[in-house]
Image (cartoon, helix red, strand yellow):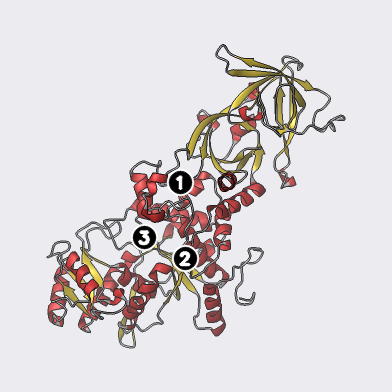
Amino acid sequence: MTQAQAQTPAGDQTLIPNDFIRDIVAQHVAAKTHPRIHTRFPPEPNGYLHIGHAKSICLNFGIAREFGGVCNLRMDDTNPTKEDLEYVDSIQADVNWLIRGWADDVLGLKPRGGRPTATVIHGQPDFHLAPVTAAARPEAVEPFYASDYFGPLYEYAVALIKQGKAYVCDLTPEQTDEYRRLGKASPHRDRSVAENLDLFTRMKNGEFPDGCRVLRAKICVDAPNIWLRDPLLYRIKHAEHHQTGRQWCIYPMYDFAHCLSDYLEGITHSVCTLEFEVHRPLYDWILENLNLPRPRPHQYEFARLNLSYTVMSKRKLMQLVEEQRVTGWDDPRLPTISGLRRRGVTPEALRHFAYNIGITKYNGITDLAVLEFAIREDLNQRALRRLAVLRPLKVVLTNYLVGREEEMEATNNPENPAAGKRKVPFSRELYIEQDDFAEVPPPKFYRLKPGGEVRLKYAYIIRCEEVVKDASGNLVELRCTADLDSKTGGATAARKVKGTIHWVSAPHAVDAEVRLYDRLFTEAEPEKDGRDFKSVLNPHSLEILTAKCEPSLRSATFTERYQFERLAYFALDPDATPARDGGRLVFNRTITLKDTWAKQAQKREGQ
């Protein structure tokens, strides 16, 4: 792919990925086979989007963005018993969050309430619904819906019946599956056109119960590709639809609705995951046998994302939600986009991950560490540094005057000098991390120990003089002395010690609920060898602590990201409340500073 064939918007430094699908699109652009590249992202609103969908979003919107095209957002809502408006709303929120400021100008929507217009081309009835993009008023547009096309889809089904290429079948679902498996013809396959038209009309009019009859394509009963063995096109479902209400009691199957929805919207490149490769002959058969007057779309397949230490099936994710193994679809331990967003992952990090894992035709498992690296790399550049102690241990500086207070100068982000500095209060009584003290230290322990010295970051070097315990022998506090000539930035600050630890001034500390999220599963392949994926749930995937934080975090915002120095990256959770409402601080750990799981794996290998 050359820069002349694909362009990112002016001023955008994002590198354009190179993969086989973009190569195909580039060839079509060079040959001028399409007036405009038109892709789509068509999720089923039967669950929340996950990171695998993020890969598809970045591919489809990325192609439209790079080649001056449009990418429609379409709800593939053909199964009313599994769908809900909650999922419709969540999908829109996730897509808008992921593409905002990056590809929202190529987002294809439709006028609110819009339906396909009917025309006649060369004597052939045709339907079309064109997109509108960013120029439209937000309140005047909405996503496309497959249900927008129920009328045209019904007409296309009737056209196939009239051509003798579709028939009404009375076999039960179990019989249908068995006949198709055996390559055996349905006893209803040779019904007359007139009888099929009559039965299909009566199906539409609600005369038959669910499962009583279906409409099937008349292709080949023993085709090598099982999807061509007289596949189902329509089924009866007496269910209320979230968009069309009770208007319909027959609903098209995915394979019938999908290809025709692509055609109706003028899609040029229908990009699907690899499991739909065997469906492509049916996709093409339907379009070819309807004598459609406009250019037809073509389907291209790529390998879906499989990520270690998680599950990607919507059915399994729903099981975790419904069994309350997690707190909801937006639980930060889930691979859902809403869960990742709540955890503190930025859209930039997700897009960077999706662009760099590549687009191939080969299924495999992507190590979760690849995603975690992208998240760390992003947060390291943007996160504001703050001091917080998760497991507090009190320290009293015995030679620091009672009532004395200072303000220490701290760096907001060493990766970004423009972020500037801030003042952090310092006093006689402090909190440090329990793990930063060891009464009997292991070898090469460079933190605080009896008689040992460490530097308090941005402040003084201190020496541990006394360990105070309660009647039960539990550690209560440390009594230390500060080298008052060793203040960071001071004239004699050059004195070196091997350890540096963080701290918070006790009188100024702000309490915060801190949720330490970790990987949801203990095994990289939770479903390996057919085991129950729930049997390897990580019992330590969430730990909730009350932390002591520097006072500037009272003004923490939902848009900022924070690094609690020496600990991890954090983001404010939606459960937090503004200071004016009582100021409850709740932080989610987005990710640790280092890959602790890799260290554990190395230890296991060395045993």
As drawn, the residue found furthest toward the right would be 491
Q: Secondary structure at mark 1?
A: loop
Report if residue 126 is visible in the image. Answer: no
Question: Circles 2 and 1: CB distance less than 8 Å?
Answer: no
Q: Position of residue 455 (x, y in %)?
A: 75, 30
Q: Amino acid at mark 3?
A: Glu
Tell me how far mark 2 sits from mark 1, CA to CA.
21 Å
Q: Is residue 452 above or below residue 151?
A: above
Residue drawn at the location 67% of the way across and 64% of the way down: 11
Say which label, 2 or 3, has the lower sequence index: 3
Local packing at callout 1 (Cα closer than 10 Å; few below 14, some 14-19, many 20+) is many
Comparing marks 2 and 3, which lies closer to the viewer?
Answer: 2
* Label placed on residue 466: none
Residue with the mark numbered 2: 363
Local packing at callout 2 (Cα closer than 10 Å; few below 14, some 14-19, many 20+) is few
Q: Position of residue 366 (x, y in %)?
A: 52, 58
Q: Amino acid at mark 1?
A: Phe
Tell me how far mark 3 sits from mark 1, CA to CA.
26 Å
Local packing at callout 3 (Cα closer than 10 Å; few below 14, some 14-19, many 20+) is many
Residue with the mark numbered 1: 521
- Residue nearest the viewer, comparing 524 with 358: 524
Q: Amino acid at mark 2?
A: Asn
Q: Specify whether 79 is left or right of 92.
A: left
Residue with the mark numbered 3: 44
Q: Quadrant of residue 535?
A: top left
Q: Quadrant of residue 358?
A: bottom right
Q: Secondary structure at mark 3?
A: loop
Tell me how far mark 2 sits from mark 3, CA to CA.
22 Å
In what quadrant of the picture does the N terminus appear?
Answer: bottom right
Q: Position of residue 534 (x, y in %)?
A: 38, 46
Q: Is residue 438 above or below residue 143?
A: above
In what quadrant of the picture does the C terminus appear?
Answer: top right
